[in-house]
Amino acid sequence: MNVDLHCHSNVSDGVLTPEAVATYAHQAGVNVWSLTDHDEVGGTERARAAATELGMRYVPGVEISVTWAGNTIHVVGLQIDTAHPALVQGLAATRRGRDARGREIAEQLALAGVPGAYEGARKYVDNPDLMSRTHFARFMVETGVCASIPEVFRKFLTEGKPGYVPHRWASLPEAVGWIRGAGGIAVIAHPGRYKLSQTAHGALFDEFKQLGGAAIEVVTGSHTPDQYETYAEQARRYGFLASRGTDFHAPGESRVEFSLLPPLPRGVTPVWHDWF
Ligand code: AMP
Ligand code: MN
Ligand code: MN
Ligand code: MN
């Protein structure tokens, strides 16, 4: 079984339509699939229809932006009822403010010598509610400011760099509450990507567990191979289920393509262990 439970379409900051992501995943051998757009479930029905047509099992999902102790953390929700009112309202509230933030990002970039970034990034935005730093990054690669998306995030848009605008997302209790309220499973996305001290990492996992969080991503395109083992160990230690997904955004743009992502390491319980 090839399970990919973390992907983006142009309903958030991916470049392909939900149908095209389904086809792309299927061609790479995925047979259990979830579209987890940022703060948005608008692509679910299209994704489900395309997956079903291709013979893949579909898992309704989302990736929620969270502010925890001053850090941005992503929480994936899987097996959610995407029509659940509290979830729908919570996601809408989380999306609000992205456009104003985009304008502030552009103002900072202009001061740093990159003019026209709002309009430039906007060209890449298919869902007007979901302007993301990724759209700015694509614009800055297109215009030659940087050679690659990772380079943009090394030099701009992140803490301490031009174009970084602190933003208040959902709280951790809210995000986990919306997911669980919608019958879903809450998963900490790419835990290896957060710049937290060891103590803070432990506090995040403890609080998440206490709130009813059930899983962490172990094998993700956002982890290095070393981190697969590190977070498998953490999953065992905390009693979390383990998830797997590419965090696909665009062909050639993701760090690990679908077909190259390894399976979960031995000794962890997959988040999908009791789904089928
Ligand atoms: P936002 O939700 O607007 O803050 O944008 C976050 C998105 O930016 C993530 O979901 C990734 O798609 C992208 N991103 C953040 N950091 C990096 C990075 N270091 N390299 C590549 N993409 C990144
Ligand atoms: Mn993204
Ligand atoms: Mn993420
Ligand atoms: Mn993601």
Image: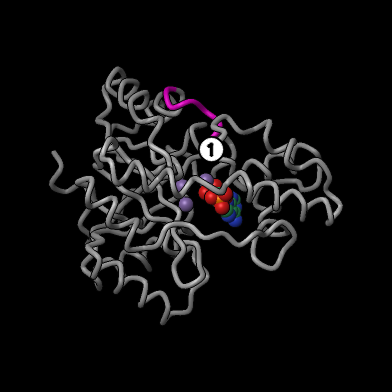
Q: Is residue 80 above or below residue 57?
A: below
Residue 126: where, in percent of width, then height? 57, 29
The residue positioned 41% from the left and 50% from the top of the image is 64
Label 1 Cα neighbours within 10 Å, binned few <14 / some 14-19 / many ≥20: some
The residue positioned 24% from the left and 42% from the top of the image is 79
Q: Quadrant of residue 120?
A: top right
Which residue does the numbered mark 1 point to in the structure image? Answer: 129
In the rendered image, the quadrant that contains the C terminus is: top left
Q: Amino acid at mark 1?
A: Asp
Magenta span dominant secondary structure: loop
Q: Is 156 left or right of 177, judged from the image as shown?
A: right
Residue 137: where, in percent of width, then height? 68, 45
User: What coloring was used for the rendering?
Assistant: one colour
Q: Nearer the viewer, residue 227 or 115?
A: 115
Q: Quadrant of residue 156?
A: bottom right
Residue 73: where, in percent of width, then height? 45, 61
Q: Is residue 46 above or below residue 241?
A: above
Residue 216: where, in percent of width, then height? 32, 59
Tell whether position 83 is magenta: no
Q: Which element type, helix, strand or loop, lies under badge 1?
A: loop
Q: Is 196 left or right of 203, judged from the image as shown?
A: right
In the image, which residues are magenta?
13-19
